[in-house]
């Protein structure tokens, strides 16, 4: 008897005849779904990157265009005004060659203000302790020339301080207005320095000065004072002082109530300056524009450093500072 003949027939699988191919099919479908999801995410990310890249490109283009506009924009924003207005020119800080109140910058602003047909008058708004008599004299002369050429009045409006060279400029105005607490005056000239000869003697330091020309070392702070050179310097100061006095007298005329202290270098508050004839009344810029010029709109002609120039100056200063530090850190050469 064959033992295999008694075995029962095989039982059919209720879930299917071939389970391994079905599992492989499900795995392939999941893999395809995962790849499709990855592709969608990748495309979405790429589109987002392109959008941000385009945004930053446009932003940089806008920034560059803005910088170029600011770099080449006119320094005189009021130079194209045609409607009736009051032209403003600021005199701020020290009056010196390289300052905001240099003759070069102020004259440029004054020319634009006078030449604008819409400017009914020019107002100098002053807040300055003074400075170079040369720079102040140049501005004074130019104001008088422009007044005669264009027939426009000039008003000076004092804020905090109008002293020394600043008053030299203000004297060219037709009228001067101040605040009751403004500081006005200081009509004088000075030259200052130091003398170190006594200290050098105590320290045993000898000054060795070689010159070609007997007065080339004049007023050297490390040499003894020479009476003749001192008298020469004093005569020069007196002459410049007299030029200042002449300008003030010509500008103020009969309104000036001269006293022994007027040209002594003293200064006064605005209220006292009005009584002395150094100013015409109390008032600010708005008052002058509204009541005297009759043109309430004020257009500023003062030259300003634009954004690009300020960045360039700051960048230049930073580079210079870095260069100095680098040089200091260099090892000495033997």
Image (tube, rainbow, N blue to C red):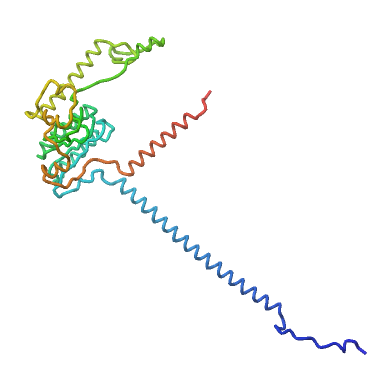
Task: Residue 154: name its quadrant.
Answer: top left
- Point out residue 292 in the picture as x, y percentages from the top left corner: 10, 42
In-front residue for pair 47/278 = 278
| Residue 272 occupies quadrant | top left
Q: Residue at x 37, y 39 (%)?
A: 314
Q: Position of residue 27 (x, y in %)?
A: 65, 73
For the N terminus, the quadrant is bottom right
Q: Residue furthest right?
A: 1
Q: Is residue 213 left or right of residue 162?
A: right
Please give the name of the residue rendered at 69% of the width and 78% of the height, measured from the top-left corner: 21
248 in relation to 39, above or below: above
- Position of residue 109 measured from the top left corner of the image (x, y, whole percent): 21, 39
Q: How many marks?
A: 0
* Nearest to the observer: residue 284 or residue 165: 284
- Is residue 12 depicted above or below 185 in this figure? below
In the rendered image, residue 301, in percent from the top left (x then y), is placed at: 21, 42
Query: Relative to 58, is 72 on the left or the right?
Result: left
Where 326 sits versus 77, above or below? Answer: above
Residue at image location 13% in from the left, 29% down from the top:
278
> Which residue is farthest left?
254
Q: Nearer the viewer, residue 194 or 265?
A: 265
For image coordinates 50% across by 63% down, the residue present is 45
Q: In the image shown, does 269 or 141 lie closer to the viewer?
A: 269
């Amino acid at each position: 008897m064959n033992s295999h003949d008694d075995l029962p027939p095989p039982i059919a699988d209720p879930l299917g005849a071939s389970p391994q191919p079905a599992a492989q099919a499900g795995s392939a479908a999941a893999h395809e779904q995962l790849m499709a999801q990855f592709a969608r995410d990748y495309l979405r990310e790429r589109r987002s990157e392109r959008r941000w890249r385009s945004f930053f490109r446009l932003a940089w283009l806008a920034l560059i265009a803005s910088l170029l506009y600011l770099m080449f924009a006119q320094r005189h924003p009021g130079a194209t005004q045609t409607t009736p207005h009051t032209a403003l020119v600021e005199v701020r800080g020290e009056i010196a060659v390289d300052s905001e109140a240099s003759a070069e910058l102020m004259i440029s602003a004054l020319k634009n203000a006078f030449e604008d047909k819409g400017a009914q008058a020019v107002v100098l708004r002053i807040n300055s302790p003074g400075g170079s008599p040369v720079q102040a004299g140049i501005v004074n002369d130019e104001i008088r020339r422009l007044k005669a050429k264009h027939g426009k009045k000039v008003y000076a409006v004092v804020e905090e301080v109008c002293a020394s060279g600043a008053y030299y400029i203000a004297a060219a105005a037709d009228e001067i207005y101040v605040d009751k607490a403004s500081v006005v005056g200081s009509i004088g000239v000075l030259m200052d320095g130091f003398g170190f000869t006594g200290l050098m003697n105590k320290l045993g330091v000898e000054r060795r000065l070689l010159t070609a020309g007997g007065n080339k070392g004049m007023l050297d702070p490390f040499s003894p004072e020479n009476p003749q050179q001192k008298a020469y310097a004093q005569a020069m100061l007196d002459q410049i002082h007299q030029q200042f006095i002449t300008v003030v007298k010509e500008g103020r005329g009969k309104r000036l109530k001269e006293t022994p202290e007027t040209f002594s270098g003293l200064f006064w508050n605005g209220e006292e300056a009005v009584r002395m004839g150094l100013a015409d009344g109390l008032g600010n810029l708005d008052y002058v524009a509204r009541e005297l010029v009759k043109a309430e709109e004020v257009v500023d002609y003062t030259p300003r450093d634009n954004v690009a120039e300020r960045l360039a100056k700051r960048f230049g200063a930073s580079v210079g500072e870095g260069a100095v530090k680098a040089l200091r850190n260099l090892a000495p050469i033997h």
